[in-house]
Image (cartoon, rainbow, N blue to C red):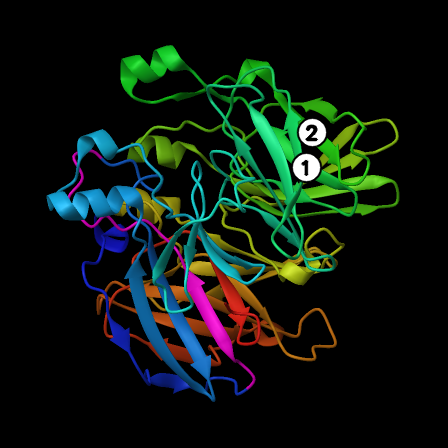
Amino acid sequence: MQGINAPVFQEVDLDNLPVTGEIPPDLAGMYVRNGPNPMFQPIDYAYPLEGDGMLHAVYFEAGKARYRNRWILTKGLIYEMQAKRALPELRFRNYANTHIIAHAGKLLALYETGLPYEMSRDLETIGEWNFNGKLKQAMTAHPKLDVDTGELHFYRYSFFTEPYLTYYVANAAGEITRTTGIELPQPALLHDMALSENYAIFCHCPLVFDFQQAMRTGIPLVWQPEQGARIGLIHRYDLERKPIWIETEAFWAWHFMNAFEQDGTLVVDCAYYPQMILENTLSAILSNRSRFQRITINLGDRTITQQTLDDRNVDFPSLDRQQIGKPYRFGYMPHMDLELMAQKAIPNYFPELIQYDLVKQTSQVHRLQPGCYCGEATVVPKPDSTSAVDHYVMTWVFNEITQTSDLLILDAANFTAAPIAQIHLPVRVPMGTHGSWMVASAAP
């Protein structure tokens, strides 16, 4: 809860924000991002899984921008607001603080283990959404949208009851059309999934639930590399086909960039960690070093080959969501500066954003000004785009000198150049997690 990660305590509305450069006139919609922001001083705090969700939105219209932020009024937060303090008995709750997506006319704030919270376009809390009673218990924060069908693919996992993994599909109208229980040998954390033309892809990594350790240390997950990892392929259309599980060496992935099928293979790109020590200490965070990795599965003989695409410490991958599940060219990840994080003794310092050309297998870097740090990038396709590079890239940037934040808009075709537009806020936007762009015609 320090520096770049410290919460803010005011909800504000700011109109006609000042801009360096020019907002592209074809930008019409809203960019909204979620993240943990405790309203009350917590008794204990495990960032980023804990902390009340707060949404930060910038609305674009006719070349102008306005900003609004709001807490997500979850049931747990409402109880604490009535008590005017953090309640330790509500520590392990649904904070709705991890992601925000739009689907079937609804704006949904998501968490790792809880029901979505429906929000209005003005960021007012409507309440929990359970897909008309068909979603039991929870969904995780990383669903995948098939833009061609409008289907939303998502899942939940359980530490206590079988099946430990359940896969869902909701159609374009928001109706759940598939619920498939998937057997796992033991409960484990599965933070993200990937989607290809024919498969939903889950990685069962050896970060497993240990009840005895949870009772003893308060940390419920333990890294057991001797178990190795398994990659599961669930067929999207043949509901009778059993999952395919392919064993490989132990690794961890918080997030996947994309997956696609090509020439009899399934390609999975991710931010890859050879190990994951899940402890709420800086030393543990710094020991978890990542890289950009390509995992290629031969669908015939079910063998795996791996290729390191970039050995820099990266995560929070993003791409044009129209390319999810398809061969793609461009993706983005911020570079984590571990030396700076060690120096400041605070996590989440990302001084540059990397653009990957997956066809040419090259990369370019947009380096921020000294003292400025970004987060996840969001890709915004240009209207009537005709090539893979016809898109904008948005990211929040915190300036530790002024203690304020800007929203940067970059041109993917001229990625290393100065931003097209730098939208200035007189307030700070804390480091958050994930967000989405919603065109004006599609926003709820």
- The front one of 174 and 325 is 174
**Residue at mark 2:** 232
Residue at the image position 18 percent from the left and 58 percent from the top: 9
**Residue at mark 1:** 201
Quadrant of the image occupied by residue 236: top right
Residue at the image position 62 percent from the left and 75 percent from the top: 413
Query: Is residue 412 visible in the rendered structure shown here?
Result: yes
Identity of the amino acid at label 2? Gly
Examine the structure image and report whether residue 37 is included in the region drawn in magenta: yes
On the image, the x and y values in percent for residue 346 come to 27, 45
- The front one of 408 and 372 is 408
On the image, the x and y values in percent for residue 188 come to 51, 23
- The front one of 149 and 434 is 149
Quick one: SS at disc 1?
strand
Q: Residue furthest top?
A: 212
Q: Is residue 410 left or right of residue 246?
A: left
Q: Residue furthest left?
A: 84
Identity of the amino acid at label 1? Ile
| Numbered range of the magenta stretch | 26-44
Q: Distance from label 2 to label 1 (Cα)?
A: 6 Å
